[in-house]
Image (spheres, helix red, strand yellow):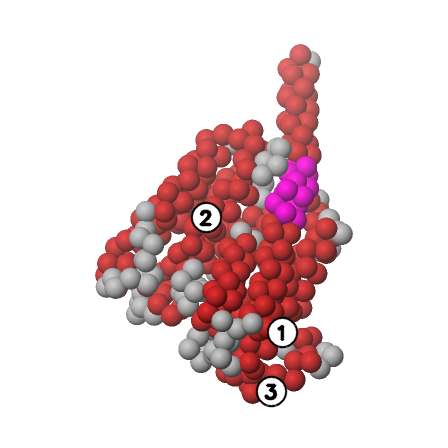
Amino acid sequence: MLFSKKALFSALAIITAGQATADSLDVTLEQIQSQFIIPKYSQFSQSAEALATSAQVLCSAPSEQTLLDAKQAFINNVEDWQQLQWLNFGPVTYFMRYYAYEYWPDKKGVTQRQLRSLSADPQTMQAPKFWTSASIAVRGMTAIESLLYHGDFNVVARPSDCEVLQAVSQHHASTTQDVLNQWQQSKATDWIFPEEGATASAEHLVLEQMVQQWLEHMSVVKDAKLEVPIGYKERANLKLAEFYRSEQSLEAIKTNLKSYRTLYHVGSPSLYDAAKAQQPELAQSLENALADNLKIAMQLPSDYFTGSYTQEQRVEMAKPLVSAISNSQQRLTNLVTSMGFQIGFNSRDGD
């Protein structure tokens, strides 16, 4: 009888601990939204509005200085986007907003062709429903970068090019404000649709999906942003690097890696706190791996994508970072599966 009581108490303790963990993760999710997603989207929206204002000033008074100001506003907006890019979830998934923000990689030059058409007849952009049917290739930062940096366009000397820049920038700012508003007016669980018969809570399913997004974005950073353009496994094509015209390719990777650590520690309890309570060794192992990623990325030369290095030199310099990101992916997978999250196939993993 004594043994049975002990067994009962042990079982109750396990159940209670599990419920406490679940409750703490519910709080973590709310704080990821309130302390990470909403503030980052607010920052992104503000810099998008500043970019639209800079484009307006440039078109009103075209000069090398107003062009430089617009380019800096664009770089600031790209930096803010990179902090959110890992999360393709929620209101950004509606109306193809996520892919409109950044039509990349544009291997066939679709953006330039469509921008040239718009510049030939800018009046088409004034149609009432133009942006609801416009191609994602001309609705966001990829189009803005082309207009500011591509040799086919001259927003200082050619008013029609600047008119397109102004319209795209304003649409981009409006879109970003809409996404922010929707995050502010909803809960993260409003954007999840559980399958019939699902037993996990909506909060658990949202966190599970966010972790999946995080893992998949690590693959994007490692494969699409780093390996593919430098020819890590095949032929090099540096023009496939993200935001290569504005020379933001390396900075984007660094910002992505910083955002991972921020995400891991946001809130009280944070994901790190919850992981530490359940799997302290795995939690600390991931923490170390995320720190190593950023440390190694910071050691790459600032002209890594733009300097006159050979393919072999770039590959050799990239090897430690490729290995480190792969290591952090595995550690994150091990940690979250041990915490009860079901991680599906990583469709963006190139390995």
Q: Nearer the viewer, residue 183 or 20?
A: 183
Asked whether residue 312 is in view, the answer is: yes
Quadrant of res 328: top left
Q: Which residues are magenta?
A: 25-39
- Residue 30 is covered by the magenta coloring: yes
Q: Nearer the viewer, mark 2 or mark 1?
A: 1
SS majority, magenta: helix
Quadrant of res 151: bottom left
The residues tagged by marks 3 and 2 sit, at their Cα atoms, a distance apart of 41 Å
Type of the residue with mark 1: Ala
Q: Is residue 154 left or right of residue 160?
A: left
User: Which sits earlier in the primary sequence, circle 1 or circle 3?
Assistant: 3
Type of the residue with mark 2: Leu
Which residue position is annotated with label 2?
Answer: 257
The residue lying at 69 percent from left, 34 percent from top is 23
Q: Nearer the viewer, residue 125 or 226?
A: 125
Asked whether residue 100 is in view, the answer is: no
Q: Is residue 310 left or right of residue 51?
A: left
Where residue 36 appears, as percent x and y from the top left, is 61, 45
Where residue 149 appears, as percent x and y from the top left, is 45, 71
Instruction: Give the class, few, some or many, for how many residues have Cα within 10 Å of label 3's Cα (few <14, many ≥20).
Output: few
The residue lying at 46 percent from left, 33 percent from top is 284
Where residue 131 appears, as percent x and y from the top left, is 67, 75
Which residue position is annotated with label 3?
Answer: 121
Instruction: Give the class, few, some or many, for how many residues have Cα within 10 Å of label 2's Cα (few <14, many ≥20).
Output: many
Which quadrant of the figure contains the N terminus? top right
The residues tagged by marks 2 and 1 sit, at their Cα atoms, a distance apart of 32 Å
Numbered tag placed on residue 167 in the rendering: 1
Instruction: Give the class, few, some or many, for how many residues have Cα within 10 Å of label 1's Cα (few <14, many ≥20).
Output: many
User: Which sits earlier in the primary sequence, circle 2 or circle 1?
Assistant: 1
The residue lying at 70 percent from left, 53 percent from top is 183
